Image (tube, rainbow, N blue to C red):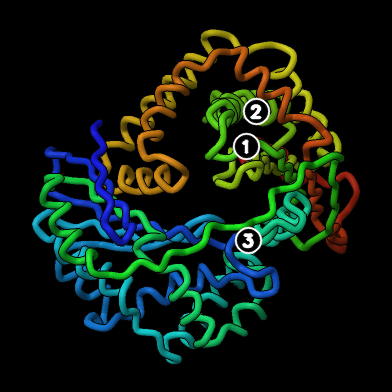
Amino acid sequence: MKINKHILKNGLRLLHYLDANTQMVAVNIMYNVGSKDEHPDHTGFAHLFEHLMFAGSANVPDFDELVQRASGENNAWTNTDVTNYYISLPAHNLEMALYLESDRMLALNINQESLDVQKQVVAEEFKQRFLNQPYGDASMMMRPMVYGSHPYAWPTIGKKLEHIEQFSLEDVRAFYEKFYAPDNAVLAICGNVSFETAVSLVEKWFGDIPAKNLPSRQLAPVQKQLAANRLSVTRQVPMDALYKYWHAPSVSEAGYNECDLLTDILAGGRSARLFQSLVKENRMFSALDIYVGGEAEKGGGSIQFCGKPLIGVSLEDAEKSLLEELQMLVDEPVSADELQKVKNKYESAFLFRNTNCLHIATQLCWYELMGDANQYLSDFKRTLQLQASDLQAMAAKVFREDNCSTLYYRAEKIEETEGFEEGEETEDANSFEDI
């Protein structure tokens, strides 16, 4: 893969990758602003603003309509570190996508009606995902335990509904003026378009947008955890759940690749260790997963576990069985066959994902904001060179009790059904096939 780069005078970074095997092009623009840039008493704004970016701009009253006319599709997402917007469309319509993105970068239509509508939309999303869904509030309890006073301590959507409801039009204007600028963004174009054409069109549509010379972030570092954090809550949910977060290297730090492979060994499919041992053989959990977090700040990375013990298995016993499996990674290096298996899966997934121009465009923007777009390729190569000793050392570093925060999410006990006779046969709640 050859990654081309061009920097405009206003600071906008253009990344380009040519794929002559498609007639499509992906345009991805990533702004260096996320929920970590919010005030702790004023959270959820980066995500709300993402919604407002589709409300129209000076020359484009309906953003989605023009994308559809150009036979394209578009969407956006926000996380703790960045806000991302993308359009995928036929390559000959590239200029339409650049026109649309430049117009809303320069002159977004900020109005009270759009703000009121999007506040309602985000409020409903908050209720659906966090308030009205079983286990929905788990992350809202876990993150403060893990991150303390750091901005990673609240979810991207915000701490509470009141914060979303309080945002004013002045807040919108101030946020837009501060963060939405060419020198705070990376633009990637991937598909059947030459580098020369991409540079020419980007200069045409973005070259005159003034830079805003944003000061560098001054975030306090993530505090090192010195002792285990534990919390137990009871909710009206179908069954108990166990959540555990360990501090780990972030995506911008050395060691992230080791953590990525470790979680693949533990839960990368039905042949992985945790599924085979704790779900299939020893019947401790009905479902589980363990994965690396996507945080970018140094010291802010994580490995996260969530699992639901089978009915009749206590959270204490389930947690003990999990910790025994993790200790095996510390005590003994993984076998050559097991390591090669996860490397093969990692390599095939990487190659298959790279048949998608939008995936490449998103990754190039992300890695550029983390330091250098070319690290996308060097990270891949480095991961394939990791040894069993590297994973064993990282497991010993991460999977420590004083480095972990644990949530026992207990199901509220329900009184037995009236009229139930002792000894009456019931459906086996622990049947693996039923679950």
Quadrant in the picture for the C terminus:
top right
Quadrant in the picture for the N terminus:
top left
Q: Position of residue 232 (x, y in %)?
A: 85, 52
Q: Secondary structure at mark 3?
A: loop
Give the label, 2 or 3, closer to the camera: 3
Label disc, if present, on residue 274 of the rendered structure: 2
To which quarter of the image does residue 167 belong? bottom right
Q: Residue at x 31, y 33 (%)?
A: 352
Check contact, mark 1 vs mark 2: CB within 8 A. Answer: yes
Is residue 435 at least partly visible in the picture? Answer: no
Give, as a three-letter code, the residue at label 3.
Answer: Pro
Give, as a three-letter code, the residue at label 2.
Answer: Leu
Looking at the picture, tell me which residue is in the foreground, 111 or 374.
374
Looking at the picture, tell me which residue is in the foreground, 218 or 353.
218
Looking at the picture, tell me which residue is in the foreground, 228 or 124.
228
Q: Secondary structure at mark 1?
A: strand
Q: Position of residue 46 (x, y in %)?
A: 52, 68
Position of 52 relative to 427 (above/below): below
376 sits to left or right of 60: right
240 sits to left or right of 292: right
Q: Residue furthest left?
A: 92
Report how far apart the C-alphas of labels 1 and 3 lie in the structure.
Answer: 19 Å
Residue under label 1 = 290
